[in-house]
Amino acid sequence: MMNYFGELTDVVQLLRRNADEYPDRPAIRVSGQGMLTWSEVDVRARMVGGLLGRTIVPGDRVVLSFDTDVDFLSALFGCWYAGAVAVPVPPGRAGERAAHHAGASMVLTTEDVGIAVANKLAVTPDRANHHLALIQYTSGSTGAPKGVQVTHRNYMQNLRMLDEFYRSIAPHVTDLHMVCWLPHFHDMGFALLMYTVLRAGTATLISPMSFLKDPSVWLRTIGEVGGNLSAAPNFAFDLCIRRVPAEILNLTSMGVILNAAEPVRPDTVERFAEHFEPAGFRAEMMAPCYGLAEATVFASGVRYDGRPRMVRFHRGALQTGFAVEEAGTGRPLVSCGRPADGLVARIVNPSTRVECGPGELGEIWLHGPNLAEGYWRDDTSPAVFAAQMSGFDDTPYLRTGDRGFHWRGELFVTGRLADLIEADGWLLQPEDIEHTVERSTQLLHGRRCAIVPYGPKSDRLALLAEVRVPLPLDGQQRAELESAIREAVTIEHDITIAEIRLVPTGTIPVTTSGKVQRVKARDLVAAIDTEEPVR
């Protein structure tokens, strides 16, 4: 097994090594923009570093405002060559807010890379001269986006964990070729790009909009370039099942395709493997995993044996906070594998801070060298990043805010604690109900919906559901739709939906990574109720 780390201590040294040892190997390509080798990326990065060195000092924050761009990697490493802290953001208003919050000294764009190359004022660093590597902004699905402070050491440790994860599933892959449509400002898209740097592989990037317009472009590109690493949230796999015929694809080269960033659905894992089997896709290629920006990105997913593990658990027990296996008729859940070596994952009662017993659901707490320093300019950091368990030692843990449990050494993640809803005596994750709603009728299949607490005491449930047909529906069609939804939810979850609000496609507020913004969704229901209901 090749050791890609050697004596390297920070990410700056990774690119210098690639430029020295693999100068002519393709590093990054984007359709319509061409390709750069590792030597070319390094030269351009040193020139960006030279440009920045004229105006900033080590530790200054530099915003990277790029669409899917072949020069993003050069701009990123140019920041690090100059000792700057990189702040990748989406172009537009969201990025402007993040730039303001970060107190950035400068904003880098594609045009700035061109200016730097023209100036030819280069730097040649041996290592990073500031400990902080980047501020990674979270998506803000449950509140305002937060800037996570990730150090060079954090990222090197997490790359080691990613390498353990990748090799546990695809030990046969030697020459890495990553294909990805996730944006660079998304922690998972960023991490896959950095893992490509570690492995001195090749990254082929696709714009998110290209994927959404034509999901086949993602899978076709994998076949065309021989991709063996990729990743996407669960919804993307569902989208491909619906819209991409297997007959036009060749997926035999794939080694690992991560399913992460939102709850992994058992039926999605099974249907994707079945649908694309004629194209050479094998079930063991799918890699459900768990991570978060506060842990740099990767936390759990290591798996050394075959296809993803799916276990059926008693539905009623899950809704009271316990995992009890029930083969045959139980609710299936997908394992997120084992935590990476060196990372401790505990399940803790969020109220008492006492570790939960076997099979008991609680908050996931993490301890390890990949955990970030804290949030940028945020007083909540100590409570989140340095939590201590009651009756335990003084080990600091990261409170992830995610709910889950351990089962036979593997981690199962059920959703966000902040999203947890108590209704009719049950504890429910809204994503589970939404998944049921989406499958309840063809009219909602593939559409976005949102379950939110409802009523003066927030003890009832309301549903926002996007439909692609013109509104309002006629009386009979609406009655049939509501009946199908309520019946499916009652059968699957033994609860009742009090109110159903149908809205046009694109109405439900989501984050940049496609997650429902639940506070805003709840406000939308209230706004609809104060006006003439949207029918």
Image (cartoon, rainbow, N blue to C red):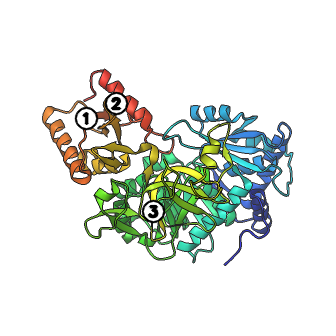
Instruction: Work out whether residue 227 can be spotted.
Output: no
Contact between marks 2 and 3 (CB within 8 A): the answer is no
Height in image: 281 above or below 443?
A: below
Could you say where residue 121 lies in the image, as x and y percent from the top left?
86, 45
Which tag, 2 or 3, sits closer to the chain's start?
A: 3
Given residues 175 and 40, the one toward you in this image is 175
Position of 286 with respect to 369 (left or right) is left
| Mark 2, residue position | 525
Q: What residue type is labelled 3?
A: Gly
Could you say where residue 97 lies in the image, as x and y percent from the top left?
61, 32
Q: What residue type is labelled 2?
A: Val
**Element type at mark 3:** loop
**Element type at mark 2:** helix
Q: In which quarter of the image is the C terminus?
A: top left
**Element type at mark 1:** strand
| Mark 1, residue position | 499
Which tag, 1 or 3, sits closer to the chain's start?
A: 3
| Mark 3, residue position | 357
Position of 218 with respect to 94 (left or right) is left
> Which residue appears at 45% of the width and 43% of the height?
418
Disc 1 from disc 3: Cα separation: 37 Å
Could you say where residue 466 lies in the image, as x and y percent from the top left?
32, 38
Contact between marks 1 and 2 (CB within 8 A): the answer is yes
Disc 1 from disc 2: Cα separation: 10 Å
Residue occupying the far left of the picture: 476
Crowding near pointer 1: few (<14 within 10 Å), some, many (20+)?
Answer: some
Crowding near pointer 3: few (<14 within 10 Å), some, many (20+)?
Answer: some
Disc 2 from disc 3: Cα separation: 38 Å
Given residues 503 and 492, the one toward you in this image is 492
Q: To which quarter of the image does residue 1 belong?
A: bottom right
Could you say where residue 361 lies in the image, as x and y percent from the top left?
42, 57
Given residues 469 and 166, the one toward you in this image is 166
